[in-house]
Image (cartoon, rainbow, N blue to C red):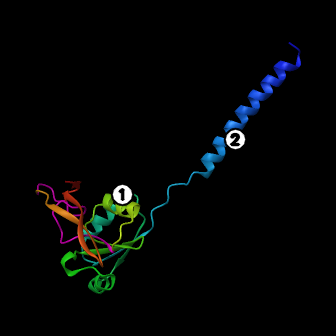
Amino acid sequence: MTSHQPISMISRRALLAGFAVSTLSMTARAAPAAEPMPKMLVTKDPTCSCCTAWVEHIRAAGFDVDVVESPEINRLKARLGVPQTLVSCHTAEIGGYVIEGHVPSEMIKRLLAEKPEGRGLAVPGMPMGSPGMEVEDMEPDTYEVVLFGPSGQRTYARYRGGREA
């Protein structure tokens, strides 16, 4: 063995190792970062405390939320195309969708990830135990999260209180 062989052997190994690290580094940089959630705009009646509790639920799930208080919320619902049968106490807008009522945060995240055709999600009325409607010692209701839009309405999920049923 000449004195040059071990040096060239190390150099090739170092070169291959360097290439591998470089490739991994470039791949890691090229991987798309998780897209941040869009900002949510919630419009609510100034006197509604359950709406405030729902906004707290949404913020705790990592959403960035702006709140507008308006006694004229029914005009907004009509303009956004919320069917009368799905109306609740507050209306939110996020990522091109409408969120009506006490929709659980997990369903909003699912909606934004799946991007189904529709105008938005709704939980009609104010079901007991839904996010923002939790009352100690009260039995939670079973309710539907409804996907609605120009092509109609369909059940997107069923919940009992704060848990998917």
Q: For the residue labelled by badge 1, is the local secondary structure a helix, a strand or a loop? A: helix
Q: Going by the image, does 63 lie left or right of 3?
A: left
Magenta stretch contains residue 122: yes
Image coordinates of residue 129 in percent, x first then y, are: 18, 59
Pick the front one: 154 or 74: 154
For the C terminus, the quadrant is bottom left
Magenta stretch contains residue 17: no
Image coordinates of residue 64 in percent, x first then y, are: 43, 65
Q: Main secondary structure of the magenta part?
A: loop
Image coordinates of residue 47 in percent, x first then y, are: 25, 77
Residue shown at 69%/41% (left/top)? 22
Q: Which residue was labeled with disc 2? A: 22
Please identify, in this view, whether the residue under mark 1 or under mark 2 is nearer the observer. Answer: 2
Please name the amino acid that badge 1 sits on: Ala
Q: Going by the image, does 154 lie left or right of 120?
A: left
> Which span of residues is magenta-colored?
119-138
Q: Which residue was labeled with disc 1? A: 60
Please give the label number shown on residue 105: none
Please name the amino acid that badge 2 sits on: Ser
